[in-house]
Image (cartoon, grey):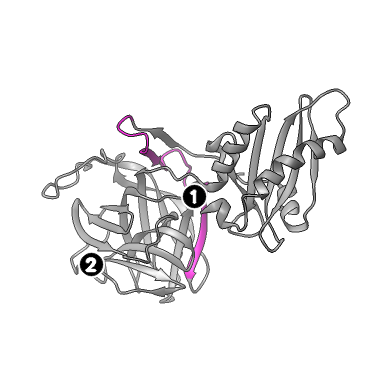
Amino acid sequence: MWRPFCLTLCFLAASVFAAEKHIDFSQLREGEAPPGFRSAVSGQGKPGNWKIVLDEAPSLLPDLGPQSHDKPPTSTTVTKRAVLAQLAEDPADEHFPLLIYEGEVFGDFKLTTHVKTVKGAVEQMAGIAFHIQNETNYYVVRLSSLGKTFRFYKVVNGERGIPVGPEMEIPSGVWHELTVECKGEEIRCSLDGKELISVRDKGNALTSGKFGFWTKSDSVSYFGDTALTYKPHIAPAQVLVGDVLKKYPKLLDVKIFVSADDSKTTRLVGSKESGQNGQPGVDAERDVIDRGSIYYGKEKDSVTVTMPLHDRNGDGIAAARVVMKTFKGQTEKNAVERARPIVQELQARIQSLQDLVD
């Protein structure tokens, strides 16, 4: 189970719809891979080699509020600190290492980070992939020191769309501030405080998804602390759990698990404590989804029943864990019967996996 690492999540007073997340690598040891992320690859070859290294890097990110495009970034103080590095040097042209943040799905957001291209004979690129559906469908904005370009494009079923963005000098070995802002179909990208890309993906926009760090081919690239302001995404599964807990206030908890991206584990998508969402399940949830099994557990003051949820074709797509207060004489059979109507109410509102995770 991965642990959160210096991820601060707070709701801003300005709006009940705005939240802020800060990803800070400073408390990780050199040589570690950051927890909470999944290493993947788009295109050919193996996933990248993502590790923490020490480098002369900008201090914590400046305020993400409005900044004049005529002024340089305010974060100029540098010190030796932990940063994220992609260290693999696979020269394949269609090799795009991704490090995907697994903790949350983002819709409208503004992301700011620092990036630096370090070396590469074939490419020297660094970027941010966002609204990631999977390794073959996402947006990306990247800078290229060798190609002297700042580009945005969309990847659909593994095929890159038409790139948008200017040709410009982007020195290697220098930290650059990269900002991406999404509002519905509109996407704006800035480099070093200047907005250089503005596009609208009209009619076919990827309106939400995960984000990740991105490189190409043999690029060795560094990434600094990253901050997001965003409209929190409430998964349908979380809405279902809230409705059930409101109707049955004596329940201790209801949790819904779906298959993780690796198809071997599960992840939590709905629970009484929404901050737990994204955490992995255990073997029991995997077995419930795959085999339709029912699991029963008993502790001093509670009993737990985990049952499958199916799509319209009867295939298992999720596991629902119902946690109830126990009583003297509680049996497994009785606990299953108590949980069954709760799970049936969830099932009545589900026809596909999209009813839980969209």
- In percent of width and height, residue 273 lies at 57, 34
Residue positioned 26% across, 56% down in the render = 188
Disc 1 is placed on an element classified as loop
Image quadrant assignment for residue 65: top left
Q: Give the range drawn in magenta.
A: 13-42
The CA span between labels 1 and 2 is: 34 Å
- In percent of width and height, residue 40 lies at 51, 62
Identify the image quadrant of the N terminus: top right
Name the residue type under label 1: Gly
Whether residue 171 is visible: no
Disc nearer the start of the sequence (1/2): 1
Dot 2: within a 10 Å radius of its alpha carbon, few (fewer than 14), some, or many (20 or more) residues?
some
- In percent of width and height, residue 109 lies at 34, 48
Tell me, yes or no, whether the highlighted magenta stretch contains residue 30.
Answer: yes
Q: Height in image: 327 above or below 306?
A: above
Disc 2 is placed on an element classified as loop
Tell me, yes or no, whether the highlighted magenta stretch contains residue 248.
Answer: no
Label drawn at residue 31: 1
Residue positioned 64% across, 60% down in the render = 263
Name the residue type under label 2: Gly
Q: Height in image: 166 above or below 21?
A: below
Label drawn at residue 165: 2
